[in-house]
Image (tube, rainbow, N blue to C red):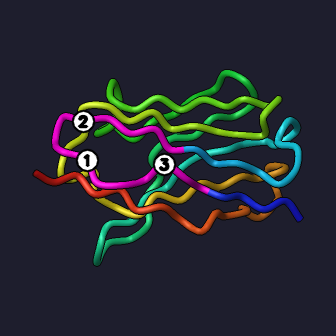
Amino acid sequence: QVQLVESGGGLVQPGGSLRLSCTASGSIFSFYVLGWYRQAPGKQRDPVASIRGGNTINYKDSVKGRFTISRDNAKNTMYLQMSSLRPEDTAVYYCYGRRTLASDNIWGQGTQVTVSS
């Protein structure tokens, strides 16, 4: 079973940037989809961005134009570049991957992102 580990979270001021990484313990080359969810305190876990195949990308409306998802199959790593961060982006960010359409999601442990002055 491939494991996913997030890194790159932290405290940043409004308007700042962070890059999250999600590194897999094995190959992600053949994964059907990879993506990110986030969960703010007291709220449900919501999808943020996903990348299917090499070029089908979807974003939550509120992050469009500010966040960029990418993957580097050679490094078995997925990224979420976050810019123009807002306090409402504060959440625990989880990466996930799914081998096939019918597979269950494999989840990382989460990384905290806090946007505050």
- Write the start and end of the magenta stretch as one range: 6-20
In the rendered structure, which amino acid carries the disc numbered 2?
A: Gly
Residue 23: where, in percent of width, then height?
Answer: 70, 48
Alpha-carbon distance for marks 1 and 2?
6 Å
- Expressed as whole percent of the image width and height from the top left, the position of residue 47 reads 47, 52
Is-magenta flag for residue 81? no
Crowding around mark 3 (Cα neighbors within 10 Å: few <14, some 14 to 19, many 20+) is some
Q: Which residue is mark 2?
A: 16
The residue under label 1 is 12
Mark 1 packing: few (<14 Cα in 10 Å), some, or many (20+)? some
Q: Secondary structure at mark 3?
A: loop
Place of residue 36 in the rendered image (x, y in percent of width and height, measured from the top left): 54, 49
Specify whether 23 is left or right of 88. right
Q: Are marks 3 and 2 in contact (CB under 8 Å)?
A: no
In contact (CB < 8 Å): disc 1 and disc 2 = yes
Q: Where 1 falls versus 23 (above or below)?
A: below
| x 72%, y 29%: residue | 72
At label 1, the amino acid type is: Val
